Image: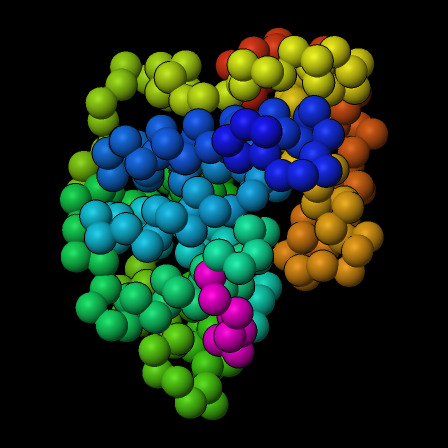
């Protein structure tokens, strides 16, 4: 049995475990800029332990933590009441939201070099006609969480002032000519993947399809609420997405397309 494999796995699952191990090794040997880039384009149908690892690192940038917290859609979870340790469930969002909030309230994220703009982080442009509407929505999110947390006894899980910002000054992440250059180096396939890849419905966007199927299975088992939400959202658009994906380019371009589905 190879590294990362568990007893009872099929070939596809074993290949995904090996791939994940390679991706984690890549992150551990990368810079905080790369961590931010990974978080920016992360597909939230995937397992979350890469994000868990990043937000727990001493050199995780403040903007990276903010990016992950708000992409986690905190208004959709009672994360203040969640007492599950981060990492016990690789798909559970709430424990990570709580961890980030607690860290902001107990020393925070000391590294503050990277710029953060919530519009960019949500895939919008400042010049868009909808920018003001989107900004108003984020301000309502701040207000909703502050109001909800008034009766929460643990101050460590409440929104810290540093978390209630729309923008953080700093520099853009660097180190590569463009985003594709980064993902050309990021592990996206496994050496033993050929047999699993032969299945016709996995020929395109394999990692995303596998993650979605995992979410569907977890939802059917009555697992973590975040998995159920992701699975239901996927099912609503599954037929249309698969038809569209079939007409798109494969390889890095197709993989990058999957990253923007959050």
Residue drawn at the location 31% of the way across and 60% of the way down: 165
Residue drawn at the location 44% of the way across and 42% of the way down: 50
- Colour style of the rendered protein structure: rainbow
Residue drawn at the location 42% of the way across and 56% of the way down: 69
Counting the numbered discs, the total is 0
Q: Is residue 202 above or below residue 233?
A: above
Question: Residue 208 at x, y = what percent?
Answer: 63, 30
Q: Nearer the viewer, residue 16 or 243?
A: 16
Q: Would you identify the image quadrant in which residue 241 lies?
A: top right
Residue drawn at the location 23% of the way across and 26% of the way down: 174
Q: Would you identify the image quadrant in which residue 108 lies?
A: bottom left
Furthest residue to the front?
Answer: 1
Secondary structure that dominates the magenta span: loop
Q: Nearer the viewer, residue 32 or 26?
A: 26
Q: Which residues are magenta?
A: 79-86
Question: Residue 253 at x, y = what percent?
Answer: 53, 14
Q: Which of the image's four quarters has the C terminus?
A: top right
Q: Is residue 96 above or below residue 150?
A: above
Report the side of 73 relative to 105 (left or right): right
Q: Is residue 30 above or below residue 139?
A: above
Q: Which of the image's four quarters has the N terminus?
A: top right
Question: Residue 153 at x, y = what percent?
Answer: 42, 89
Question: Residue 26 at x, y = what percent?
Answer: 36, 29
């Amino acid at each position: 049995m190879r590294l990362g494999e568990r007893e009872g796995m099929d070939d596809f699952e074993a290949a995904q475990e090996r791939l994940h191990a390679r991706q984690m090794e890549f992150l551990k040997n990368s810079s905080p800029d790369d961590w931010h880039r990974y978080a920016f384009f992360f597909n939230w149908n995937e397992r979350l332990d890469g994000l868990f690892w990043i937000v727990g690192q001493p050199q995780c940038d403040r903007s990276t933590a903010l990016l992950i917290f708000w992409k986690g859609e905190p208004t959709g979870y009672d994360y203040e009441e969640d007492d599950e340790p981060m990492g016990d469930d690789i798909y559970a969002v709430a424990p990570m939201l709580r961890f980030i909030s607690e860290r902001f309230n107990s020393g925070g994220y000391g590294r503050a070099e990277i710029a953060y703009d919530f519009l960019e982080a949500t895939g919008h442009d400042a010049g868009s006609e909808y920018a003001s509407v989107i900004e108003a929505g984020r301000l309502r999110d701040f207000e909703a969480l502050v109001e909800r947390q008034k009766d929460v006894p643990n101050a460590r899980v409440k929104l810290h002032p540093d978390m209630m910002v729309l923008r953080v000054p700093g520099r853009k992440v660097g180190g590569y000519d463009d985003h594709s250059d980064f993902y050309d180096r990021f592990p996206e396939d496994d050496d033993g993947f050929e047999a699993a890849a032969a299945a016709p419905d996995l020929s395109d966007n394999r990692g995303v399809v596998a993650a979605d199927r995992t979410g569907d299975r977890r939802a059917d088992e009555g697992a973590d609420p975040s998995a159920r939400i992701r699975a239901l959202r996927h099912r609503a658009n599954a037929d249309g997405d698969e038809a569209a994906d079939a007409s798109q380019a494969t390889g890095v371009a197709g993989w990058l397309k999957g990253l923007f589905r959050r």
